[in-house]
Amino acid sequence: MAYLNAEERAKLVNELKTLKFNQAKGKVRGLDPKGRLVYFRNSQGVGRWMTRFELPTLGIRVTLVESHKDATHGNKIKSEFDMTEVIAEALPGNNT
C-alpha cells in the first residue's frame, strides 16, 4: 500500500470531520492493520483532549481533537466531549 499524499490526507480529514468521535476512531483503526493508538484523550492544553493514531503503512499520523464540558443531569455531572478538529500529518518517512 502506498503512502497518502497531501491531497489524500485532506480528503481523509474532511471525511472524518463529518463523523462522530467513535465512528471516526473506528474508521481510523480500520485503515491500517499495523496502525497503533499512541494516546487516548490526552489533555495537551486547557479544554483540548487529543487522541492520536500512527498508521505506518499509510505513512500518516491522525489526531482527533475534542473539547470537553461538564453537563449536569439532575444530581449527576456527566462529561461531554465534542470533536472539534482532525489533523492528518505525514510521518517522517512519507515524502509525498
Image: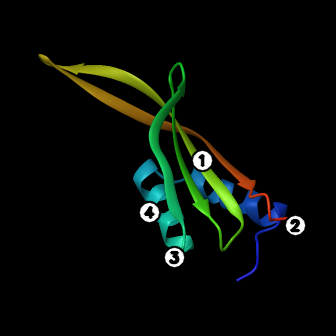
Residue placed under numbered mark 1 in the picture: 63
In the rendered structure, the answer to whether residue 50 lies left or right of residue 56 reads: left
Q: Earlier in the sequence, mark 4 or mark 1?
A: 4
Q: Give the farthest residue toward the left.
A: 75
The residue tagged with tag 2: helix, strand or loop?
A: loop
Spatial CA distance of label 3 from label 1 is 17 Å
Spatial CA distance of label 2 from label 3 is 21 Å
> 74 or 30, which is in the foreground?
30
> 50 or 73, which is in the foreground?
50
Residue placed under numbered mark 3 in the picture: 33
Q: Give the farthest residue toward the front.
A: 93
Determine crowd level at label 1: few under 14, some 14-19, many 20+ residues with C-alpha closer than 10 A. many
What's the residue at 76%, 79% (across, down)?
Answer: 2
Q: Earlier in the sequence, mark 1 or mark 2?
A: 1
What's the residue at 29%, 21% (across, down)?
Answer: 71
Determine crowd level at label 4: few under 14, some 14-19, many 20+ residues with C-alpha closer than 10 A. few
Q: Earlier in the sequence, mark 2 or mark 4?
A: 4
Residue placed under numbered mark 4 in the picture: 26
Quadrant (top left, top right, bottom left, bottom right) of the N terminus = bottom right
- Residue 16's x, y, as percent? 58, 56
Spatial CA distance of label 1 from label 2 is 19 Å
Coloration mode: rainbow
Determine crowd level at label 3: few under 14, some 14-19, many 20+ residues with C-alpha closer than 10 A. few
Return the mark for residue 7. none
The residue tagged with tag 1: helix, strand or loop?
A: strand
- Residue 41's x, y, as percent? 44, 39
Q: Disc 4 residue type?
A: Gly
Spatial CA distance of label 4 from label 3 is 12 Å
Residue placed under numbered mark 2 in the picture: 96
Q: Disc 2 residue type?
A: Thr
What's the residue at 87%, 66% (across, down)?
Answer: 96
Q: Disc 1 residue type?
A: Thr
